[in-house]
Amino acid sequence: MNEARVERRNLLLIALTFITTTVLGLSLQGCQTNSTIDQSGSATPKQQAEKTSTPFLPFGNGDTEQIVSTATTTPTDAYQPVWEKYAPPSINPATAVPPPLTDLDLSDEILVWILLGSDTEPPFIGRTQAIHLLFIHPRFSKVSLVSIPGDLYVYIPGYTMQRLNTAYALGGIETLRETFAYNFGVTPSRFVLAHPGDFQWLIDDVNSLEVTVFYPMPDVCGGIPAGQVTMDGTLALCYASYREGMDEVDRMRRQQQLLGLIFHKLTHDGNLAKLPVLYASYREWVKTDLSLKELMSYIPLALRLADPDRINYYMIGWDQFSIWEVPGHSQAQVFLPNRERVRALLQQAIDDAMVPAPLTNYVQTLEAQLTNAIKVTISAVSTSTPTPSPTPTQTTSGTPQVTTTGGTPELTPTLTPTVPGYPYP
């Protein structure tokens, strides 16, 4: 009886051991099948993609972008990187790289220029804290100016996701052009880069600006009251460059105001007659690919653009971006763009430049002012040319005296001073 009981117990233990061994074997096989580590001990491409993929964080009003993988894996025939034909990032981005913006409707008649303001004097290359994109339609004499914040977080081809204001410092104008082509769908054909001193001198050269200050700034720039303020170069530079915290929108609005006043000052009272002198004065400081000959050819267009309501002003502002803190210990804050809203604003700016409008007789007044200024300039040059200091010259006058040297007669002229000057016919 006891022996039968012991035998049954042994059989039960053997069965339990067999079942346990089978279950453990299947479990180990399953773990090896689902493992994310290959035989070499490195993570698989799928795991790398999961680790480096960072979704675009929510933009303004809760909008989100599609998650894009930034894993650097060996491409296959079917693999298409999100950056397409542009250079891949050389540094892991803090957020996912968006695809290029390519769906803008831009006419071939539209010229795309860009105005840049550096925060550093030459020969050093600093950040471009002023960025203004111009869409120019010469035939319709219309312009749309779009101000873009320098802290906008964009993809710089060949580098990484970074502030827009670093693109020029990283690779010059070509890198900036690539950055604009990627993130805004346009490539500037001409550029002008001014430094703080250049801007300051220009205001002084146009004999100051009369600026309407809407909100007083008592604690900066020596105190700026509200109302009409006469600004020289130093005050205008402070007014244009000061930013309170992250309020880039207010600074861009002040920069637009000054740009409009400078353009008005240059196109009125024949001041464009000074363009050759200004170009010669600034060519060693201001960086541009515009030649003097090309600039002179645009003088008639400038006069037409000075006609009222020919220039429209836009800015990528709070409706197009939101403040985002870059991951890490720096706690740096940037402007993360809502790409669809940025695209819509750029398209509106382009479309508005394509709307024709008749010119007024005001253009004829500006043309007459310029013509008179040129006449005065030519007259001033011809009459106020400095002459050399008076120096007596020797000329022959009177009757020559006869002298002899060694028995040979010679003629000795009488020397009298004459007044020097330009020989008029």
Image (cartoon, grey):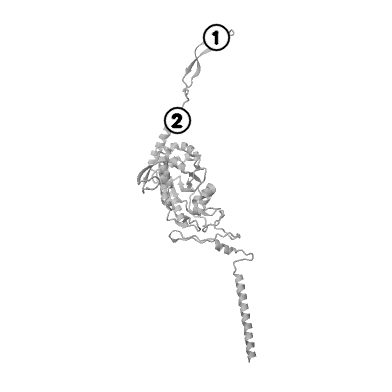
Which label lies toward us, 1 or 2? Answer: 1
Q: Is residue 313 visible?
A: no
Q: Secondary structure at mark 1?
A: strand
As displayed, is residue 346 above or below residue 414? Answer: below
Residue situated in front as seen by the camera: 4 or 23: 4
Q: Residue at x 61, y 70 (%)?
A: 33
| Residue marked by disc 1 | 403
Residue 286 in percent (x, y) is at 49, 42
Residue 395 in percent (x, y) is at 50, 17
Q: Residue at x 61, y 79 (%)?
A: 20
Query: Quadrant of the rendered structure where residue 318 is?
Result: bottom left
Residue 176 in percent (x, y) is at 52, 49
Distance from Cα at disc 1 to Cα at disc 2: 50 Å
Give the residue at the far front of this rendering.
2
Q: Which mark is residue 384?
A: none
Give the residue at the far top of this rendering.
407
As displayed, is residue 412 above or below residue 142? Answer: above
Q: Secondary structure at mark 2?
A: helix
Question: Hey, what amino acid is under mark 1?
Answer: Thr
Q: Is residue 13 visible?
A: yes
Residue situated in front as seen by the camera: 396 or 333: 333
Marks 1 and 2, the one that precedes in the sequence: 2
Residue situated in front as seen by the camera: 211 or 20: 20
User: Which corner quadrant holds the N terminus?
Assistant: bottom right
| Residue marked by disc 2 | 381
Residue 105 in percent (x, y) is at 48, 53
Give the residue at the far bottom of this rendering.
1
Question: Hey, what amino acid is under mark 2?
Answer: Val
